[in-house]
Image (cartoon, rainbow, N blue to C red):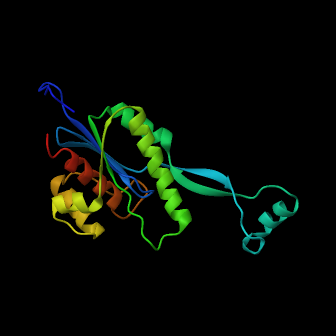
Amino acid sequence: MKTHIDFDKSFKVIGIDPGLKGGIAFLEDNHLIQAVKMPTTQLETKTKKKVKQMTAKEKKLHKSKHAVYKTKTKVDSKAIYDLITDFEPDLVVIEKPFYLAIESRQSTATIAENIGRIYGIVESQKYKLEIVSSQTWKKYFDIGADKEEAINKAQELYPEVNLISPRGRVKSDGMAEAILLAVYGNRSN
């Protein structure tokens, strides 16, 4: 907890929408420095596919007792670590995950694993961490669950922001939500 305010030092906040289609936003003294899509990577993992679900190539590997692998998208821990530690934030605000009852156990486990990777990075560097539910920060901005509302609010606050990723054609609600999370974290400073 801060007991002394250093007026010569700027206040840096990172907002993170932790989903695979999420984003990371960097604010310094309420000025948007950068917003990026969530860095991801592909990992090969062994699979326990049923034989009838395998491709011909996978069936051949299976018969020869070789492991069958599939690729899985995960958040890129190294890239996230580099982004966060290069910025040296005073506060990191992460959206609390919301698990829908209709999601599969595998989907829920993947979400939890990705969030755990991000928490681990932040906590290992001893940065101040605030975990906030989507209902809380959306209420602060008076927006609803519609992703377009978050995009519009982020562009209202920072008209110069480009929410279209380099290879994308549509605006990233993940980057917009990351921006709003950072602004929410900056609310008391």
Which quarter shows the C terminus?
A: top left
Q: Is residue 39 visible?
A: no
Which quarter shows the N terminus?
A: top left
* Picture coordinates of residue 58, whole percent (x, y): 77, 64
* Picture coordinates of residue 77, whole percent (x, y): 49, 42
* Picture coordinates of residue 177, whole percent (x, y): 29, 57
Q: Say whether residue 92 is left or right of residue 118.
A: left
* Picture coordinates of residue 42, whole percent (x, y): 58, 51
Note whether 28 is above or below 110 in the view shown: above
Q: Residue at x 82, y 55 (%)?
A: 66
Q: Nearer the viewer, residue 136 or 87?
A: 136
Note whether 128 is above or below 175 in the view shown: above
Q: Residue at x 81, y 67 (%)?
A: 59
Q: Residue at x 32, y 31 (%)?
A: 88
Q: Is residue 157 visible?
A: yes
Instruction: Tell me the quarter of the picture where residue 81 sits.
Output: top left
